[in-house]
Image (spheres, helix red, strand yellow):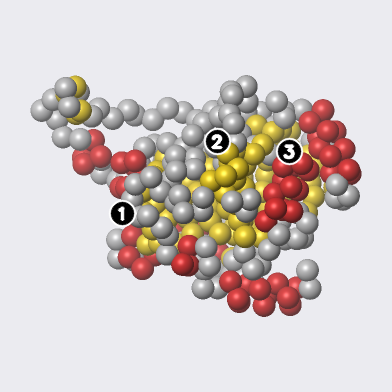
Amino acid sequence: MALHSFLGMEIGVPNPSDLAAAYGQIGLVGDQDRWGTRDRPDQIRIVEAPYRQLRSMRIGCENEGDLLALRQRLTSLGVEAEELPGQVSCLDPSGHWRIVVEVAAPSSLSGSPSRVHNRPGERGRIATRADVVTEPTPRPPRRLGHVVLGSPDPLGTAKFFLEGIGFRMSDQVAGLLTFMRCSSDHHNLLIQPAPVPYLNHYAFEYDDIDAVGAAASRYLEGQEDRHVVGLGRHVIGSNVFWYVNDPCGTMVEFFSDMDDIPEDAAWEPRVDWEISRFSSWGPKEPPHHFAFPPDLEAIGRAQEGEGR
Ligand SMILES: [Fe+2]
């Protein structure tokens, strides 16, 4: 096994305090610039930046041998790597995202209180109200699960992550959208076409569909304009989803029940998915701004000013 986990990310926004307030609102734990969950307390770092952006991703690997193999792969692709004790990092080909791979111990999540359901022919909850109804606050997010990046060269960017960093491909849509993993999640990263390199969304895992529904509903109270699309279940990855906007204009996906693919499990990536297979139930297709957010042009102008 080489890569085994998505450890975290650094996100840059013009107004960090607004984002920090939203993270507190949805039940993340942290302070002004470091946020996470009860089991994984340091998954997101917020820094001030001129426009919203992903700045880095941290990926966990098993040992120094994995870092050696990584350096060799990067060299063969002509990618310059930086080394620090226990880690290797590099920039993606667009020069926007620093990918840090570090030796880390795999960390499991604590279990969650199970819910008892009533099903036809199988009544489990007798004379008791459903716990999602009686819980005083929605259950919090359990971890950061994945990010989705837009790229003007989606296949070249995917090649960098697959052949350079060492992600494993899970599925692909029409030769354009590449779902890949660095853990047993169906995807920790999706690369999709876009006019400029940008962060399309990041995603928090919740206990189950009730936790997703309760958390998104609570988040949208009084700020319904932050709703994007949901509730539904994706076809690729099978996850339940509800997408909202964070206060800086980046989409956040609340998800649960994603396909899990352990290292030694048989999994045949499909590369012929149709782009129309957005959901198996729920909204049949997302709004236009799901893939083309209104600030893309402004992000592109800001990037031109950076000269990258
Ligand atoms: Fe997602």
Using the image, tell me which numbered label, if any, was put on residue 217. 1
Q: Say which element carries label 3.
A: loop
Whether 247 is drawn above or below 218: the answer is below
Q: Are marks 1 and 3 in contact (CB under 8 Å)?
A: no
* Residue found at the far left of this picture: 127
Task: Determine the residue positioned at 88% across, 49% down.
Answer: 78
- Judge whether residue 83 can be spotted in this image: no
Using the image, tell me which numbered label, if any, was put on residue 185. 2
User: Within 8 Å: ligand 1 and the Cβ of disc 1?
Assistant: no
User: Within 8 Å: ligand 1 and the Cβ of disc 2?
Assistant: no
Q: Say which element carries label 1.
A: helix
Q: Residues within 10 Å of mark 2 (few under 14, many from 20)?
A: many
Using the image, tell me which numbered label, if any, was put on residue 166. 3
Q: Say which element carries label 2.
A: loop
The location of residue 16, given as percent across then percent down, is 55, 64
In front here: 158 or 247?
158
Quadrant of the frame with the C terminus: bottom right
Task: Determine the residue positioned at 70% across, 53% down.
Answer: 155
Q: Alpha carbon of mark 1 to alpha carbon of mark 3: how far?
A: 37 Å
Q: Earlier in the sequence, mark 1 or mark 3?
A: 3
Nearer mark to the viewer, of 1 and 3: 3
Q: Are marks 1 and 2 in contact (CB under 8 Å)?
A: no
